[in-house]
Image (cartoon, grey):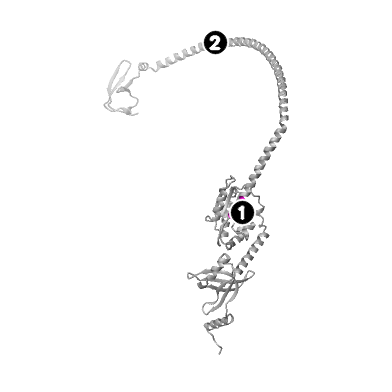
Amino acid sequence: MQTQYSLLQINKHISESIKQSFPAPVWVQAEIAKISYSAAGHTYLELIEKNNSTTVAVCKGNIWASYSICMHNYVEKVGQPLQVGSKILFLARVDFHERYGLSLTILDLDTSYALGELLKQKQEILKQLTEEGHISRNKQLPFPSCPQRIAVISSPTAAGLADFQQRMLSNQLGVQFTLQLFPSEMQGDNTPSSLCRALQNIRKEADNFDCVAILRGGGAATDLHCFDAYEPAREIAMFPLPVITGIGHHTDLTILDLVAYHSADTPTALAEYLMQHTAQFIAQLDQCSMFIMNYSDRYINSHHTNLQQLADNLSHYVAIKLQAENDLLARSLNKAFLAVLEVSRIQREAIAITETSLIRLAQQHNRIEHNKINLLAAQLQANTKRGLLQSEAHISTLEKIAMLHDPQTLLKKGFSITRIHGRAITSVSRLQPGELLETRLEEGIVFSSVEKIQHA
């Protein structure tokens, strides 16, 4: 019969084998893929190893709360906490628990290795920016002769910001600067994305500014790693305005310093740079003003005599010209007067001829109209007489017709008119038996009553 093992027996055997293979803690290189924290102060890591982009090994890692001092040392010396993507060298005990499996219990972190990895990462970012042509792009922009409108990116509570504002706004040059703050985080993991947002907000109103100043001031040198990120460096390189930095350090330059138009050690030193640049512009203006004044004096003095001679010649020429124009005007006026007289004479003769012609035409017209009136009067008289005769004949005819229709004439011919209640009867339908009737004849009136009604 084959030998059988329980799962617990197998796991115990593995645990014993690992203890024998790794009796003491060992130094391990790995990359952090995941990280989480417990309320008890423990830190849990998922550690991986990659070959190019392929993950070739995975293991759990633990930093118990009792060893959390190594994390504090790491943050203090490296300048940033453990985070996803960090490559670390750590001292760990290899453990295999029958229930929870393989894990590495981290006892210490090598900060020198982490700093070397950060430096390596910085060099890779610089290489990428160089290959993309971004390193000197912002430096090629023209810098304003007198940058008065400055967009400032900084933490509102930064001491360096106050120093920069005090130096700029109380300058001895008599120049009025306008500073507008665009708040950003200047320390920690969120700094790169916060800087990008501030730059993007300034880009929306870039026409309102001459340059951009990024200020930090103070803090540990290890806090500078957040200024070595690729995204804000590329944003600065592609920015349409010159970007100047005063991040606050004396020894090492960050990537943002390298891609910026100009970098200074501190915000105050950056303010001095702007003051010197503005002072040079003012000095150049003073030199130009002095040159213009001196040149003007020399030019006026050298041409004063020529101007006086030109003025005398001009006066003499104007007098001669005026006399010639006066003579020409007098001759023109005389010609115009004679012409007016000739035109007046011609017009008078034309008026006299026109007047005679009008009188003759009027007389001829009057004769014609008089003859027309006489003819019309004769025609009117004849037409009136003929009309009267026709009217008299028509009236006589109407009188005869009226006589024929006179009721008295009809009565003489034997007709009668019967009335009831004073109205002539035209229809028997209006009569009732017993009603009194009045019948008019030529010689008198007959009264009667209705006895019977017979319809036709």
Q: Secondary structure at mark 2?
A: helix
Range drawn in magenta: 265-274
Query: Looking at numbered disc 1 in the image, what kind of residue is underneath it?
Result: Ile
Residue at which label 2 appears: 377
Q: Is residue 282 above or below residue 161?
A: above
Q: Secondary structure at mark 1?
A: strand
Q: Which one is in front, 393 or 433? A: 393
Look at 72% across and 33% down and name the residue there: 302
- The dominant secondary structure in magenta is helix
Look at 62% across and 57% down and name the residue there: 257
Q: Is residue 452 left or right of residue 48?
A: left
State which quarter of the image contains the N terminus: bottom right
Q: Is residue 316 above or below residue 54?
A: above
Q: CA distance from mark 1 to mark 2?
A: 117 Å
Q: Which one is in front, 252 or 155? A: 252
**Residue depth check, mark 1 versus mark 2: number of the one nearer the observer:** 1
Residue 29, located in which quarter of the rendered image?
bottom right
Q: Is residue 326 magenta?
A: no
Looking at the image, do the residues carrying marks 1 and 2 touch, with CB atoms under 8 Å apart? no
Residue at which label 1 appears: 244
Where is residue 390? Give x, y as percent: 49, 13
Q: Is residue 431 above or below residue 45?
A: above
Q: Is residue 433 left or right of residue 340?
A: left
> Can the viewer see residue 82?
no
Residue 376, located in which quarter of the rendered image?
top right
Where is residue 19? Give x, y as percent: 56, 81
Residue 287, located in which quarter of the rendered image?
top right
